[in-house]
Image: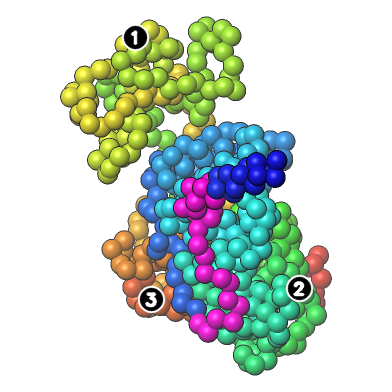
Amino acid sequence: MRSSKYIFALVLSLVTQLACTMHSDLPRNMNLKAFDPHRASFRCKHEAEVVPPVDPEAQQWFLQAMAVTSYEKRESDRDHKVAAELWQKAADRKHWKAMINLANAYAHGEGVEYDSEKAVLILEKAMKLGIPAAYDAMGTYHMEGLGVKQDASRAYAFWQLAADMGSPNAMAYLGSKLQGVYDDPQSGFWGNRTVAFRMLECGFSQGNGQSAYELGVILDGKQAELGEDYVRALKVFHEGVKFGNADCAGWLSGSFRSGEPMVNGIKDIARADRYSRLGDALLRNPDLRLPNLDKVLPLPPADLPKWDGEKKTLVDAAKPLAPALATPSTPGAQRTGRAHIPDGYVLPPRALPPQDESAGWNPDAGVAPQYEATAARYSGYWLAQLLEDRDARSAAWNRAQVPQRYAQREAFESDRKAMGLSAHDGRLMWHYVGVPFPRAEPRVDPRIAQGIARSTVVPEYALTCAGDVACPKTGVWSASIPKDHPSAARYNRWDRQSYVTQGQEFPNPESSHLHLEPGAVTWLWLGNANESGFGGVAYVSLSRLGAEGANA
């Protein structure tokens, strides 16, 4: 009996070891360099320069998903199910932000059934693409024991790796943990201010609001050995509000209300009130960014422009502007043959079969794809896709396909040569897309629908200016550098905007550690949102806010 138990234990041990060996190559189980809170240095990398390029159509799906789950909507009006479907489509095109959002949807059961293993699998796909944010999220999953064994040591090791790869979120978190005056691992902080400072500077240069907050705290004299820098602290906190950080707004509100040393000991209740209102808005909607903050809340010694006292006016004026989109022909309207879609019609976000052909069909089960050499189960549009992206050519073939209309029981195209395929390209599947329906609303930029941007009509004449000269016209300016510039990936963002007054200098990228000459930047004038009738800040009295500190 004792012998049989020994043999059973030995077999079980071998099976366990084999199972561990089989899965040791999974990213969740990868070998990691142990977290070193006393590391001597940190090299700044930018996430934008290492993530894979984003497919334009996948980007639209991603933004549409963000719009239907916008924080501006009531929770009951947010459509997490549609968002998950759109993120899935974008994730299939390797859209890295969609992959992270889809993983978190499964991790929290939002729009999909809770499935922590699926969440981890999606993260692992993103990790294999070299996406820093995926390593950052895997650290969080290990800290919470979400789909993996809870392990704080591995969590910190993943966060350290993510920061080294370029994740600004990981930099902000670790930077906050390393800025202690001494080590206290039990409380979760260590004393390595030099590396903390470098991490936070790198996160700040990527527009990360939490990095701005932690950096501002250091500069506001909380770490004397690094030296107080009230002037820069004020600017960093202010930039943090632009980056969408509510804590930065709260810190500035308190500083101006109390007259802290950072603001030269001067109480400014009007400014404090505006920062407080903006902080509340940012707390309610973390997706908000306020690049045009200086339009309604410039730093001293600039006077405050007049304001009607409404929070919405304040927030809308500080939001980025997005060009109003003309309503073009419907996608597919210019195509011919089976790919033609009647103008004014669009395909649905969810593939639903025609009602008269769906008796007994369970909509939650979806429409299963069909193999080649079969006939369409439903009338509507079907998309041909190779089952596997074996190489760059097959991946490109998949991306080039467009939905094609087939009637119920009509045989799918079977001539591989005519389709540009060979027998070596692997199995082909037809995916049901649905039946077109009339587009009821005009085309709207998803960011406007999401509530994080305001619509504007770009002036017919293009007023541009180099960044090393004085601003020639007051208004909102959008910044960019040529796409072939080495720093294009890190600098060009849709919300890289600023409200600049005539004669003032344009923002200097060097002040944000972007290592870019101001003259390399081209600024495009988008309009003066303070002019009457432009939909910006109203010229009304500030008297009801109180006279103290009101520089109206």
Q: Nearer the viewer, residue 517 or 467?
A: 517
Q: Is residue 279 left or right of residue 442?
A: right
Q: Is residue 360 above or below residue 371?
A: above
Residue at position x 32%, y 19% in the image = 372
Comparing labels 3 and 1, the label whose residue is closer to the camera = 1
- Is residue 33 part of the magenta span, yes or no? yes
Badge 1 crowding class, 10 Å Cα cut-off, few under 14, some 14 to 19, many 20 or more, is some
Q: Is residue 470 above or below residue 354?
A: below
Q: Amino acid at mark 1?
A: Glu
Determine which residue is flagged by label 3: 516
Is the image coloured rainbow, by chain, by secondary structure, or in one colour? rainbow
Q: Quadrant of the N terminus?
A: top right
Determine which residue is flagged by label 2: 187
- Asked where in the image residue 168 lies, by quadrant, the reply is bottom right
Badge 2 crowding class, 10 Å Cα cut-off, few under 14, some 14 to 19, many 20 or more, is few
Q: Measured from the top left, where is residue 329 in percent x and y?
A: 36, 31
The span from disc 3 to disc 2 (Cα, nearest Å) is: 39 Å
Determine which residue is flagged by label 1: 410
